[in-house]
Amino acid sequence: MADAAEEEIEQFMHGLERRNPGETEFHQAVHEVVESVMPFVLDHQKYKQAQILERMTEPDRIIIFRVTWQDDSGQIRANRAWRVQFNNSIGPYKGGLRFHPEVTLSVLKFLGFEQTFKNSLTGLPMGGAKGGANFNPKGKTDNEVMRFCHSMMTELHRHIGEDTDVPAGDIGVGGREISYLFGQYKRLANRYAGILTGKGLSFGGSKVRTEATGYGCAYFCENMLKHQHDSLEGKSCIVSGSGNVAIYTVEKLNHLGARAVTLSDSDGFVHDPDGIDAEKLAWVKELKEVRRGRISEYAEEFSTAKYHAGAKPWGVEADIAFPCATQNEIELEDAQSLLKNGVRAVAEGANMPTVLEGAHAFTESGILYAPSKAANAGGVAVSGLEQSQNALRISWDHEEVDRRLRGIMCDIHEKCVEYAKNGDGTVNYVRGANIAGFVKVADAMLAYGAV
Ligand SMILES: NC(=O)C1=CN([C@@H]2O[C@H](COP(=O)(O)OP(=O)(O)OC[C@H]3O[C@@H](n4cnc5c(N)ncnc54)[C@H](O)[C@@H]3O)[C@@H](O)[C@H]2O)C=CC1
Ligand SMILES: O=C(O)CCC(=O)C(=O)O
C-alpha cells in the first residue's frame, strides 16, 4: 500500500478512536473496511471531498432504552436495549436484534456498520442497522422471554416500520422471540405489517429464511471454489457454533457433498470424524431449537464423536473452516493453526469472527477467505425477499426462494471479483466486498448532497 494511503488510514483511525473511546469492536470493524477502501477513495477524490468515509462511520441515530419486565418469581428486572440506525441511504434500516449478556453499544455499532455494507452487497434496497439488549435468554422460561420481548417492543415500536426500520433475529433471537415481538407490535400499532422479518410461516414469514444464512454461506464457498475450478464435493469442514447459522451451514454442506466434522458452543466443541450427517443434524436441531441443551450432549448420543471441553475447533485438520458462532472467535494463533494444518478456504458465517491480525494472515497466505459481510449476506437477503413478499401480499415456494438466494450469493461473489481480482487471477475477497459494498452507498450519499 502507498505511504499516502497508510498515513490517511492512521489519521482516520486516530480520529475515529478519539470520537468513540473504548469501542474496540467498532474500531476493529471500521479498521478492516478503511484499510481496503481508503486507497480507492484517494483514487476517487469525489468521495474524499464529500467526506463519505467520515459520514459512513457515524450512525444516523442511536436509540437507548430501558426494558423492565417481571420474572416468574414476581421479581422486577431491568435491562438495557439499543437500536443503532446506521445508514438508510439505499433503503429502510435493516438488521437483526441480539439478546446476549455481553451486548454493548460497541458490539451493536460494529454490527450496524457491517450491516450497511452487507445489505448493499445483496443488491436489495436495504439500509444498515442493528439492535439488541444485554438480556440473557439462557435459562429463562418461555414466559419470561415473552414478557421481556413484549416489554422491549413497547418502546421499540415507536422507532420501526416497514418503510423506516425492519429488525430481524440474531444471536439469542430466533422464531420464538420474533413471534412475541411481532404479536406485541400488532397489538400496540393496531396494524398488520411487515415490520419484522424471520416471522413464522403462518403469519407472513418467508420460506427458507430460517435456513438462509447457513445455506448462503455454503453457496458463497461453492462459488469461490468454482472460480478455482474446484467444488465442495468430498471436502471436510470445521464448523463452529451450533445455533441457526451453524446448523443450516452443515445442512447445505451435506447437500453439496461435503462433510462437516465439528460443532461448538461457548463451553467446548464436538469432533465427529465420520461427519454430522442428516440424521445426526436432525438430532442437533431438536437439541438446540426445542430442548435448548448444550452441544456436549452430542458426544453422549453419538459414539463416533468426542467432546473437548473449554476448547475451540480450530486445531482440527480439515479442508475448509466455517466460523459460525460469534465475533473474534478466531484469534491469531487459531488462524495460524488453521493455516499450518493446510486449510484451503475460510467462509465466515458469523459476523467478524476473525481478529484483524488473523484476517491479515488469511489474506497474506493466499487461501480463499470470504469475509462475513459477503459470506453471510444470505440471511438478510432472504429477509429482503420476505419484505417483498409482504408488500406484494404473496408467498413464494421453497424452490423459488432458494433459487433467488443462490442467485444473490453468486452475484455477490461476482461483485467481489470485479473489485478485487489480483494480477495472478486470485481474488482478495476482503477488498472486493468492502469496495463493492461501499460504492453503492457512497454514490447514493453523493447524490443526496450534504444530508
Ligand atoms: N441468524 C442470522 O440470520 C444471522 C446471523 N449472523 C451471525 O451468525 C452468528 C451466529 O448467530 P446465530 O446462529 O443466529 O445465533 P444463535 O443464537 O442461533 O447461535 C449462536 C451460537 O454461537 C454460540 N456462541 C455464542 N456466544 C459464544 C461465545 N462467546 N463463544 C463461543 N460460542 C458462542 C452459541 O453457543 C450458539 O451456538 C452471529 O455472529 C450472528 O451475528 C449473521 C448473519 C445472519
Ligand atoms: O435478516 C436481517 O434483517 C438481519 C440479519 C443479520 O442480523 C445479519 O445479517 O447480521
Image (tube, grey):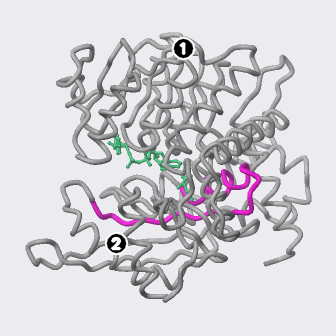
Amino acid type, mark 1: Lys
Which residue has dot 2 on it? 149
In the rendered image, residue 181, in percent from the top left (x then y), is placed at 41, 72
Please give the name of the residue rendered at 33% of the width and 32% of the height, measured from the top-left corner.
Answer: 264
Amino acid type, mark 2: Cys
In the rendered image, residue 57, in percent from the top left (x then y), is placed at 66, 62
Q: Is residue 7 above or below residue 235?
A: below
Q: Is residue 140 left or right of residue 135?
A: left
In the rendered image, residue 196, in percent from the top left (x then y), is placed at 53, 68
Please give the name of the residue rendered at 39% of the width and 79% of the height, measured from the top-left corner.
Answer: 184
Please give the name of the residue rendered at 37% of the width and 63% of the height, measured from the top-left corner.
Answer: 177
The magenta region covers 111-136
In the rendered image, residue 244, in percent from the top left (x then y), is placed at 42, 44
Quadrant for the N terminus, please.
top right
Taking the image in four quarters, ligand 1 sits in the one at: top left
Closest to the observer: 31 or 267? Answer: 267
Helix, strand or loop at label 1? It is loop
Q: CA distance from mark 2 to mark 1?
A: 41 Å
Task: Give the mark, 2 or 1, whose residue is nearer the N terminus.
Answer: 2
Q: Is residue 370 left or right of residue 414?
A: left
Q: Is residue 63 left or right of residue 128?
A: left
Q: Does the magenta run of residues contain 134?
A: yes
Q: Is residue 300 left or right of residue 392?
A: left
Circle 1 crowding by C-alpha within 10 Å: few under 14, some 14–19, many from 20: some
Quadrant for the C terminus, please.
bottom right
Q: Which residue ends up furthest to the left in the rendered image? A: 73
Please give the name of the residue rendered at 26% of the width and 34% of the height, measured from the top-left corner.
Answer: 295
Q: Quadrant of residue 213?
A: top right
Closest to the observer: 267 or 337? Answer: 267
Q: Does the magenta run of residues contain 93?
A: no
Indicate which disc residue 235 carries. 1
